[in-house]
């Protein structure tokens, strides 16, 4: 991989190699990742999206790595994240497109440089449309239909396209465990609590271990992993599941089908009502008569609680570790989702753990 101190020069050379030197470059808003995007405007032609993913993250997880090796390698390997790799995005996008979903077409890419040019799917993010008054019901219904169709597919162990290949790894016990462990580490730092005691940590592990085991045992479907209203676009001129544009899927794994539902319905950046949650789950189950209803819903609540704790750790680290206070705005909502999950009778022991160790004033 060629590393350059002149990233702008490297990007300009890439665009020139692919016939885009004269395109107007307009920066787009970023997120908490290390990626940056620009819109490429060309007179008389469709605009494109320029992805810049500099190689600055720790390495992704080698498929053959043991849990101990993954712990030594760092967070990306533990959590089975793609470390922003462009080849992960390219291979995943092309597989999704081959299944009839609206991932961006890859116009050009050089994975070693961390650069790619993509089809521009527009600006009609679910989140922005709903903020502007669009009825959310048909949007969520279409998003559910995408997951129902996606979960009927049998994803291969390795995604291959345009000279890129990427393993579709299982969201396994260690990956599921990592988010919980990081909550234990980071929430006290953020909320000003003393570190959790050894007994509290041991009890946490005992409570979550069987839930993680269920999550790994049923990890059978393609999981987008970041499936929420900021990463879904409405494309009403397309048909059926292609009406939903998909973004930021490079961290995809093979996971329990409930995981992406937690991302969609426990959306940290917008309120999803209990009524909308119920309607979405019922619509999905009506299309999945191969699933046991009560088992799926119990797993959804349990994994949803674990996912909410994981998201709280991410926000706590953004604030306490990286000095980004804007993420505090998302925390109360995420606590509400976690509390909603913990109302399930079978999760009463986990609710009791939080009640004992994270007092109400520390849930902010």
Image (cartoon, grey):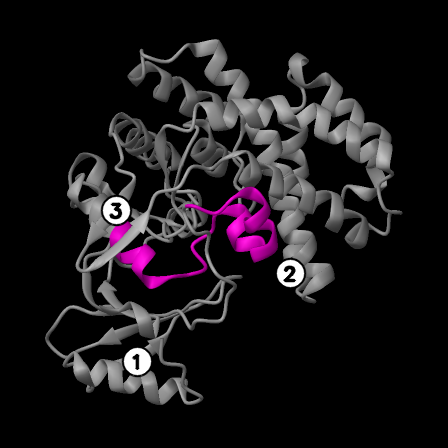
Q: Nearer the viewer, residue 296 or 87?
A: 87
Q: Which residue is mark 2?
A: 326
Cα distance in 3D space between marks 1 and 3: 31 Å
Tag 1–tag 2 contact (CB < 8 Å) = no
Q: Give the secondary structure at mark 1.
A: strand
Quadrant of the frame with the N terminus: bottom left
Query: Which mark, residue 159?
Result: 3
Residue occupying the far left of the picture: 44
Name the residue located 33 percent from the left edge and 63 percent from the top edge.
86
Q: Residues within 10 Å of mark 3 (few under 14, many from 20)?
A: many
In the displayed structure, 104 sits above or below 361; it is below
Between residues 19 and 203, which one lies in front from this camera angle? 203
For image coordinates 70% across by 24% down, the residue present is: 207
Q: Quadrant of the C terminus?
A: top right
Q: Earlier in the sequence, mark 3 or mark 2?
A: 3
- Left or right: where 111 falls relative to 200: left
Pick the front one: 348 or 91: 91
Q: CA distance from mark 3 to mark 2?
A: 36 Å
Dot 2 surroundings within 10 Å: few (below 14), some, or many (20 or more)? few
Magenta residues, start to end: 64-92
Residue 271 occupies which quadrant of the picture?
A: top right
* Marks 1 and 3, the one that precedes in the sequence: 1
Side (left or right) of 186 relative to 8: right
Q: Residues within 10 Å of mark 1 (few under 14, many from 20)?
A: some
* Percent x, y of residue 127: 43, 48
Q: Which residue is mark 1?
A: 25
Closer to the camera: disc 3 or disc 2? 3
- Tell me residue 69's x, y (percent): 55, 50
């Amino acid at each position: 991989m060629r590393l350059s101190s002149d990233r702008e020069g490297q990007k300009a050379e890439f665009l020139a190699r692919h016939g885009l030197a004269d395109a107007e470059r307009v920066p787009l808003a970023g997120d908490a990742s290390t990626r940056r995007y620009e819109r490429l405007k060309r007179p008389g032609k469709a605009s494109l999206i320029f992805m810049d993913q500099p190689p600055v993250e720790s390495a992704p997880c080698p498929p053959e790595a043991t849990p101990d090796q993954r712990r030594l390698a760092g967070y990306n390997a533990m959590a089975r994240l793609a470390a922003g790799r462009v080849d992960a995005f390219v291979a995943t996008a092309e597989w999704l497109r081959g299944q009839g979903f609206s991932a961006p077409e890859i116009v050009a890419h050089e994975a070693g440089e961390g650069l790619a040019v993509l089809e521009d799917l527009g600006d009609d993010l679910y989140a922005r449309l709903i903020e502007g008054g669009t009825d959310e019901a048909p949007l969520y219904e279409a998003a559910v239909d995408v997951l129902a169709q996606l979960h009927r597919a049998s994803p291969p162990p390795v995604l291959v396209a345009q000279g890129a290949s990427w393993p579709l790894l299982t969201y396994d016990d260690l990956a599921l465990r990592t988010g919980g462990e990081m909550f234990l580490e980071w929430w006290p730092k953020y909320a000003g609590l003393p570190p959790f005691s050894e007994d509290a940590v041991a009890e946490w592990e005992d409570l979550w271990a069987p839930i993680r085991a269920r999550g790994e045992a049923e990890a059978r479907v393609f999981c987008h992993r970041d499936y929420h209203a900021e990463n879904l676009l409405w494309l009403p001129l397309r048909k059926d599941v292609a009406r939903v544009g998909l973004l930021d899927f490079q961290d995809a794994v093979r996971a329990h089908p409930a995981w992406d539902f937690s991302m969609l319905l426990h959306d940290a950046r917008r309120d999803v009502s209990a009524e909308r949650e119920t309607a979405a789950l019922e619509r999905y189950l009506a299309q999945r008569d191969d699933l046991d209803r009560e088992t799926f819903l119990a797993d959804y609540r349990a994994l949803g609680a674990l996912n909410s704790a994981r998201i709280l750790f991410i926000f706590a680290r953004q604030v306490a570790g990286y000095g980004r206070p804007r993420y505090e705005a998302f925390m109360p909502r995420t606590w509400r989702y976690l509390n909603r999950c913990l109302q399930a009778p079978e999760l009463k022991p986990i609710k009791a753990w939080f009640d004992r160790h994270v007092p109400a004033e520390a849930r902010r």
